[in-house]
Amino acid sequence: MEAIKVRDISKVIFLNIFTLGFYNVFFLNEVGNDANQVCYGDGKQTQSYLFAWLLNFISFGFYTKYWYFTLGKRLNRNSERYGFKMIENGFDLFIWSLVPLVGKHIVATILVENMNRFAESFNS
């Protein structure tokens, strides 16, 4: 299994702004792949964010919010396996994703912070 990347939130936000949001698609797709790796064995599979992003166009913006919800719920349930309890859950990510302009950055911050905690334990 590959090591999970430790990410810098300032770099993620900068690249997201610099690429007018397209980096966010790449970043979240990588987070989904990492989630599948760290949560392996829980009987679930996190869908590709690229697919969710494309479905977003026909769901009037709802599908990516659902993707955040399912990812947050899955990570929260698996966090104790790695020796910590993730405070945020799927509902928190869903609510933050509704906030205009800054919501995506807050969701990204939460995901980076928690995936870094997973990476620390998973990679050791």
Image (cartoon, rainbow, N blue to C red):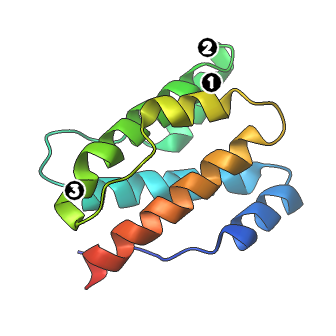
Does residue 38 appear to the left or right of 64 in the view shown?
left
Q: Image check: 61 left or right of 120?
A: right
> Crowding near pointer 3: few (<14 within 10 Å), some, many (20+)?
few
Q: Seen from this angle, which residue lies furthest bottom?
A: 124
Task: Quote the CA–CA distance across marks 3 and 2.
Answer: 33 Å
Contact between marks 2 and 1 (CB within 8 A): the answer is: yes
Q: Of the residues tagged 3 and 2, which is closer to the observer?
A: 3
Q: Which residue corresponds to mark 2?
A: 59
Kindly identify which numbered label has been placed on residue 56: 1
- Sequence order check, earlier mark of 3 and 1: 1
Q: Residue 95 carries which label?
A: none
**Dot 3: element:** helix
Front one among 63 and 78: 78
Q: Residue at x 35, y 42 (%)?
A: 46
For residue 15, which quarter of the picture?
bottom right
As measured in the structure, the alpha-carbon distance from the residue carrying label 2 to the one carrying label 1 is: 5 Å
Type of amino acid under label 2: Ser
Picture residue at 68% right of the left edge, 14% below the top: 60
Check the picture and name the quadrant holding the C terminus. bottom left
What residue would you read off at disc 3? 80
* Numbered disc 1: secondary structure: helix
| Residue density around tag 1, few if under 14, some if 14–19, many if 20 or more, within 10 Å | some
Residue type for callout 3: Glu
Q: Is residue 100 left or right of residue 93?
A: right
Picture coordinates of residue 72, whole percent (x, y) = 42, 41
Q: Can residue 3 be seen in this view?
A: no
Is residue 41 toward the left or the right of residue 13 in the image? Answer: left
The crowd level at tag 2 (other Cα within 10 Å; few <14, some 14-19, many 20+) is few
Identified by mark 1, the residue type is: Asn
In the image, which is nearer the foreground, mark 3 or mark 1? 3
Q: Do the residues labelled 3 and 1 touch (CB within 8 Å)?
A: no
